[in-house]
Amino acid sequence: MSKADPEAGKPVALDALDRKILDALQRDATASLDELAGQVGASKTPVWNRIRKLRAAGVIDRQVAVLRPEAVGLGACFFVLVRTAQHEPGWLERFVTAVKSMPEIVSAHRLAGEIDYVLQVRVADARAYDAFYQRLIAQVSIYNVTSLLSMEEIKAETALPLPS
């Protein structure tokens, strides 16, 4: 395994053991070192060393608990399509600052095509979404916003498919 060059955007070279470890950690990051070693068919020391190297290389970004949105009162998921008529750096800086400051936005992407950005927003209900929306447009000028309410989440996966 070699460390990725973040400037070049090159992926880290992963061998079969790295992929097994990463697959196991993506399924359950709370597994003990003994459990991980058993799952991947290696002894504890090499597994621990690989995990340290994967962290140092930036492959493992962080470990988190994945919550069920409904269980914490965030049952409404909106996808917000944003079009802007402004593309100067000042507007972009204000938009990025606004997006990063709003915890309701759980995902944000800049897009190619007719829509400039898509935001995934988690809130309790439509009233909470409207309050979020009012705060967003108070912080930054937006040409057009289309809000789409997700009626049903069919798949939400945090594990990445690792190439062979």
Image (cartoon, rainbow, N blue to C red):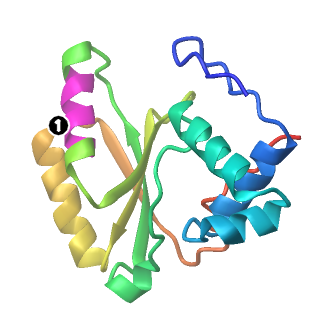
Q: Secondary structure at mark 1?
A: loop
Q: Residue furthest left?
A: 138
Report the quarter where the C terminus lies.
top right
Q: Is residue 111 left or right of residue 146?
A: right
Residue 114 in sight from this viewpoint:
no
For label 1, the crowd category at 10 Å Cα-Cα, with few meaning under 14, some 14 to 19 and many 20 or more, is some
Quarter-of-image position of residue 155: bottom right
Residue 98 on the magenta segment? yes
In depth, the one of 55 and 137 nearer the eye is 55
For disc 1, the marked residue is 140
Classified by dominant secondary structure, the portion drawn in magenta counts as: helix
Work out whether 30 lies above or below 63: below
Give the residue displayed 81% in from the left and 60% down from the top. 40
Bounds of the magenta span? 91-99
Work out whether 139 lies above or below 27: above
Work out whether 59 lies above or below 152: above
Quarter-of-image position of residue 32: bottom right
Q: Is residue 9 left or right of residue 124?
A: right
Quarter-of-image position of residue 82: top left
Q: Is residue 145 left or right of residue 24?
A: left
Amino acid at the residue labelled 1: Val
Report the quarter where the N terminus lies.
top right
Q: Position of residue 3 (x, y in %)?
A: 62, 22
Work out whether 13 lies above or below 144: above
Q: Is residue 7 left or right of residue 21?
A: left
Q: Position of residue 107 (x, y in %)?
A: 43, 51
Q: Residue furthest bottom?
A: 71
Q: Position of residue 152 (x, y in %)?
A: 58, 78
Residue 5 in sight from this viewpoint:
yes
In depth, the one of 45 and 111 nearer the eye is 45
